Every structure is written in C-alpha cells, then in structure tokens.
Image: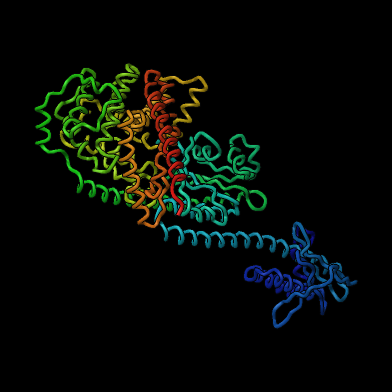
Amino acid sequence: MYALGIPHSECLSMKNKTFAALLRSLFLIRITIFVEVRILYELAQCCAQIANNDLCELYVQSEEGVFLVHKEAGEPRKIKCRKDFRKIHFGICAIQLTSHVIGEIHFNSPVSERDKQIINVICTWVAAELERTGSSSEVFARQRRLNSFLLDVAKSIFHDIVSMDTVIIKVMNFAARLVDADRASLFLVDNKNQELYARIFDVGREGEESERNNKEEHKEIRFSMKRGIAGHVASTGEGLNIENAYKDHRFNPEVDTKTGYTTKTILCMPIFIRGSVIGVVQMVNKREGVFTKDDEDSFETFAVYCGLALHHAKLYDKIRRSEQKYRVALEVLAYHSVCNKDEVAKLQKMEIKDRIEELETVDFNYLRMSELEKPLYAIAMFKELFQDKFRYDRDELIRFVLTVRKNYRRVAYHNWAHGWSVAHAMFVVLTQASKDIFTTHEALALYVSCLCHDLDHRGKNNAYMKTMMTPLASIYTTSVMEHHHFNQTVTILQQDGHNILKSMTSSEYKQVLSLIKHCILATDLALFFTNKAELNKIIDSGIYDINNNHHRKLTQAIMMTGCDLIASAKPWYIQTETVKVIFEEFYEQGDAERLNGRDPIPMMDRNKAHELPQMQVGFMRGICLPCYELIAKVLPEASFLRDQCERRSELMATVVRHLVVLSSNLLQRAPLE
C-alpha cells in the first residue's frame, strides 16, 4: 500500500480497528474460501463499512452475463441482470484482474476521496490475490484430474495384462484421452535391429482399433529409427511438439495420401524404462488448438505408468511363451525321438556312391523310392555337394538325416517324401544352374534348409494355427510353422552325435544357422509375394547384383520357393499324383475347420472338389510360373524350371478345357426328367 502512495501508518490510523478487522477477514477468506463470488461479496461488505455506507450492491461479470449478488439463507446468491450495470451516482469501485473486470461495488451514499483511495488499494490487493489463488486452484484442479486419470490408468492396465496387444491398445486410448488427441500410435523399440515396430496403430478416441482387434489380423510394420518423427524421438529420447506437420521435414505424408486423413499437429513423446527408450507414443491432431506444454508435462507423468505396464506385459508375454514352448516341447518329445542304432547301422553298411546320374534332373521320380533309398540318396547328394569343400563326420550325417526323417509326421503331403523332393530340387539347381555362384556355407544352408523346411508339419497351415489359437501360434507371431520348422532343425543339430556343422568356428556356425533360418522362413508363401515384387523391381531398374548381400538373400528366398513348388515342374504323372495328396491334406484341414464351426476356403472344401482342376491351373499360372520366370532372370541356367512349368500349366489348362466341354456335352445329352 505504501508503494501506491498511502503510508502504512496513515492507512491504519484511519478507522484502524475496522480496517485491521477487514484485512484479517480478507486474509482468512483468501486462505479458507476459494469460491470467487463469496470472496467478492465479503470484499463489498468490508468496503461499505470503510465508506460508512449502510448499503452497497455487488455486480459480478462472467461469460454468462452480469449478475447482482445478494445474501440468501446466509450464503451469497447471484441474480441475472440486464446486460448493462445499474448506474448509481454515489460511486462505483471496479474490481479488475490483469485482463478483465470481474465485478463492481455500487455505493448508496457519497464516498470520500480518502475512503476511495483505501478501497481501491484493498480491491487491487484482493484482485491480485484472487488471480494468484485462481492460478493455483487451476493447477491443483488439473493435478487432481491427472491423479484421477492415472489411477484409472493403473486400475485398467495393470488389472488386464493378458497380452502385449491389450496393453498397447489401452495405452494408446489413454494417451489420446489425456491430451485430447484425435489419434494415437505406439511404436516399440527394437534396439538389436535399430528399428521401431508396431502391430497396432492409429487408435482413435472412441477405440475403433480395439473393436477391430477381434475382427482383423494385425500386420507388423517396421521402420528404421533414423526415419521420421517417431524415429527422431526414439533416437534422441526427446519429445517433439509439432504445430504444423507438413512444415516439418521429418514428417512422412504418405499415410495421409493413402487414407485421406489430414495430419495437422503432432505430439510425439518417448517412454523410458531404466533410462532407456522402450517405446514412442505419437499423438495426432489435438481436438482444439495445438498441443501445449501442459500436455507434454502430463504425458511425462503418464509415461512412467506406460513404461511399467509395457515392461510387465513383456515379462508376462515371455512367461506365457515359455509355458507354450514347454507344452509344444512335451508334445514333440512324446511324438518324436532320434533315430535308433539299428537304422544307423543299416546305412553304415551300405555303399554311398560319389555320383548318381539319375538324380541330376528334376524329372527324377521320388515317388517310387523305398524308405531306405530316400535317406541314402539324401546323404549321396550331400556328399556330392560338399565332400571336398566341407569337413563333416559321415556317421553324424547319417544320424542327422535319419532323425530328420523321423521328425517328419505321417501327413498326406508335408511329409518326409516332400522334404526329400525339395532338397533334391535344390541339389539340381546347385549342381546344374548355379555352380560357383554361392559359397560352400550358402550352398550348405540352402540344401539343409530344403531337407528340413517342413519338419514336424501337422498338415495345417499358418492361418489354421492362428485361427484355432494353437500353442504354436502363441509362440510365434508371424510365419508360425516356418519358425517351428527352423527350431526343430536346430534341436536336431544340438542332439548328441547329430551336429554336422561342428567342424565350423563359432562365427561360421552362427552365420550358417542365420542363413538356414532365412531360407526356411522364405518357404512361407505369404512372404513370396513381397520378395517377388522387390526382386522384380530391382531387376527392372537394372541394378541387380548377385554380389549385393540383399539381392543375394532375395535370390536365395526365391530359390527356396521354387524348390518348394517343384511338383509343378515335374513330369505329368508325378505332378498329378502330388496334386492328389496336396488336396487330400487340404480337405482334411477343411473338415477340421468345419468341425470347429468355420467355413473353409474353396481350395480346402471337399464339397467343391469339382473346382480342383481350375484352381490348380490358377495356382500354377499365378504363383508357380511367375516364380520360375523370376529364377530364370537371376539364374539363366535354371530356365529349364520355367520351361517345364510352362508346359505343365498349358497341359493342365488343356485338360481343364476338355473336361469343361465333356461336362457340357453330357449335360446336353442327359434326359429330361
């Protein structure tokens, strides 16, 4: 008050008892009452006493209009007034905050200049306290809302940790609610490959993604941590608040272009656990305005809960996968065992030739081979490929091949005979069409992968495994059976007396196992289309180079698919017999699906067996022939695969046409009932 021109002692000397009481009253009000109207009403009464006015009127102003305040039942009440204040000639004192007037005190008798000065000082002081207390109250209210929100987060997330996907959906929904965003995405960090990945993204405020979760299969997307806004946040650990996405060079507009959605504002924040970034949440388009510093601060608190939830979900997922692996292992052990000594001794006594000429063509009829000849010829092919290039133990090779045979189930098609025929196809390609192109380790990985590529196949495809929620589908999220085939291969190699790779150094062993995994996973037909499109694009652009590691791996992947489909390039009598057992297995899966209340796809529906010839022509022309055409581009000497497949598909199409004509004629000749 002294700074406003009124000495402290003089203020107190004027009506000092009343004034001191009023200050004490105001101080108590400031501490105990946070309702603005009550404070202003007490202020008006105090000012009336100072001015010796028997009566004054208080008018308060808000966004809703102007109100007269009067006391009713001991509490101040507001009554709506006209738009303009009522004018009283005896004096008006405005109560003004920094930016606007919040009220006026109207006196019913004259007020002296000295009293006006004192009243103005008190009103200024009270207004300042109201503004400060209002700001504090807003902070406290926001903190209470955040605390309540985080309590809901903790209850919801930690109560329902049944899978990583469930936690991710909840985190994204809560994140969008927290900052009032239209959409949210969560990307997890893969430090090993320096990538971000997600299987669920773009969750809206209403939780559309969680509704779709049971209807659609999520496909995992991956991208480098060096790319985009999320990549920058993951790499630096620093959040980004972007007011205009299209003006930021790190923003990729491709998704907007494809979906028609328009990204305006982005808040991208890291999630830490033990000081390391484990994920990034990207929130898009605040409903009103732009993301604020308060949004950033709130999310930092929220991120602690996110980190704990994701960490616990990973632990839960790891435990669950371990349990499922244990169940699968018990099942496998109950069904399989390693080869016995008698089987090994029988093969040890037999002579294995250095070269078997009839094996040097894909026309070789593997269907007429005896059960003893298959492992014997598999060993012979291995010997011809690697005898002088790679050191291995003959007895261990015998045990390995016999145990591989034992670990193929007796299903209609994906059995030991199929595994052998695929390995034979790779043998022909390696000896006839790709000499000196691949290293010994690469050729070894290709041959072993073909021999083992369908180990422990159950006669059901990946879609069935996922739909029926089998233990295998719980362990592997993508390429379910192919991952299992690879793990079975490793398990056999780890058996005592079966490690045909034991002469290798540790680094060589890891390299070959990595190649085997790559090759076996490539037999997932779902991956073929992506590999084919990418390799065709490279070839068409004129930059294909077999010495380029990526191009080389794509070539190996396409070779694996080609060998897996080798029946389509074999003589007619072999192909037709193979088609029969393929569809026998397909129909068994279709029957199993129907028993579980699901309609099988036409290819697996025995009620649509009459469509088999047309489906086979479509399969050969849509998948097999394009695969062999691509192989011929990168390995010209393997063009015989394309030529033979083309002839077989033409023959099959001709047969189908004749069947259609014959069927039509029979229908025309049929007597009318």
Q: Quadrant of residue 622?
A: top left
* Residue at x 53%, y 45% (from the top left corner): 269
Query: Which quadrant, please, contains the N terminus?
Result: bottom right
- Relative to residue 126, is residue 372 drawn left or right? left
Most distant residue in the right direction:
89
| Rendered position, 61 above or below 415 | below
- Relative to residue 309, is residue 419 drawn left or right? left
Query: Foreground: 100 or 547?
Result: 547
Query: Foreground: 275 or 30?
Result: 275
| Rendered position, 112 above or below 441 | below
Query: Which quadrant, please, contains the C terminus?
Result: bottom left
- Relative to residue 530, is residue 514 drawn left or right? left
* Residue at x 59%, y 53% (from the top left corner): 179
Count up the numbered dots. Answer: 0
Query: Foreground: 284 or 378?
Result: 378
Residue 110: image location, x then y, percent: 88, 73
Residue 298: image location, x then y, percent: 55, 53
Residue 306: image location, x then y, percent: 47, 52
Residue 2: image location, x then y, percent: 75, 60
Query: Foreground: 43 or 249?
Result: 249
Residue 518 visible in the snapshot:
no
Residue 102 visible in the snapshot:
yes
* Residue at x 62%, y 63% (from the top left corner): 137
